[in-house]
Amino acid sequence: MLAKNMSPVVQPLEEIARLLPIRSRVMGLDLGTKTIGLALSDVERRLASPLDTIKRTKFSQDATTLIRRAHDFEVGALIFGLPLNMDGSSGPRAQATEAFMRNLRKLTDLPFAFWDERLSTAAVTRDLIANDVSRAKRADVIDRMAAAYILQGALDRLSRLPDAR
């Protein structure tokens, strides 16, 4: 049972659409073992742009940095890429993402949603290679680009919901 005014750890995107304040941004996250890629929507929630990459240290520092970045950009919700297995099952990486979210929930009231991130890194890598981006440069931008890919999928879905503001 949740305390009054506390939302569940993960909410459906449809519920997020109803909770978002008008003209608030949405942040997309690609949670990896070594880094967290961040992407940010515009205030009209039409376009996702790569923002930053947080180098992972320990949960408390990662969470503090993430919450500060969300506050700096007046973010209304967080969209986490959920790394499901190709068959749709939840493996160790998805479980680690869910655990991160449960712990982060204790530190912020921002609503969270998942977005299936299967093949997001592969799609971004293909696009970067097609654009002749060097291996070193790809390594530098891949996480935030994957976060933008994840967030754009969620934004596209949000735009088709009847309650989207």
Image (cartoon, rainbow, N blue to C red):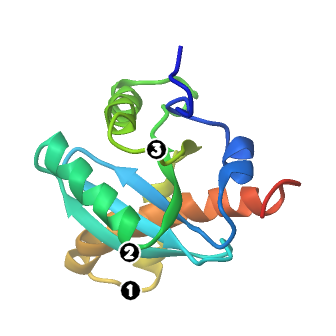
| Marks 3, 1: nearer the viewer | 3
Q: Secondary structure at mark 3?
A: loop
Q: Is residue 50 left or right of residue 22?
A: left
Q: Is residue 54 above or below residue 112?
A: below
* Residue 112, visible in the rendered structure: yes
**Label 3: how many Cα within 10 Å (few below 14, some 14–19, many 20+):** some
* Residue 125, visible in the rendered structure: no
Q: Is residue 153 above or below residue 41?
A: above
What percent of the width, then of the height, locates residue 156? 72, 63
Q: Earlier in the sequence, mark 2 or mark 3?
A: 2
**Label 1: how many Cα within 10 Å (few below 14, some 14–19, many 20+):** few
Q: Which residue is farthest right?
A: 162
Residue name at image x 38 percent, y 26 percent? 95
Q: Which mark is residue 109?
A: 3
Q: Is residue 10 above or below residue 154?
A: above
| Marks 1, 2: nearer the viewer | 2
Give me the C-alpha separation between circle 3 and circle 1: 41 Å
Residue name at image x 66 percent, y 48 percent? 16
Q: Earlier in the sequence, mark 1 or mark 2?
A: 2
Q: Earlier in the sequence, mark 3 or mark 1?
A: 3
Give me the C-alpha separation between circle 2 and circle 3: 22 Å
Residue name at image x 58 percent, y 28 percent? 88
Q: Is residue 7 left or right of residue 58?
A: right
What percent of the width, then of the height, locates residue 96? 32, 30
**Label 2: how many Cα within 10 Å (few below 14, some 14–19, many 20+):** many
Give me the C-alpha separation between circle 1 and circle 2: 21 Å
Q: Secondary structure at mark 1?
A: loop
Q: Which residue position is annotated with label 1?
A: 132
Q: Which residue position is annotated with label 2?
A: 51
Q: Amino acid at mark 1?
A: Asp
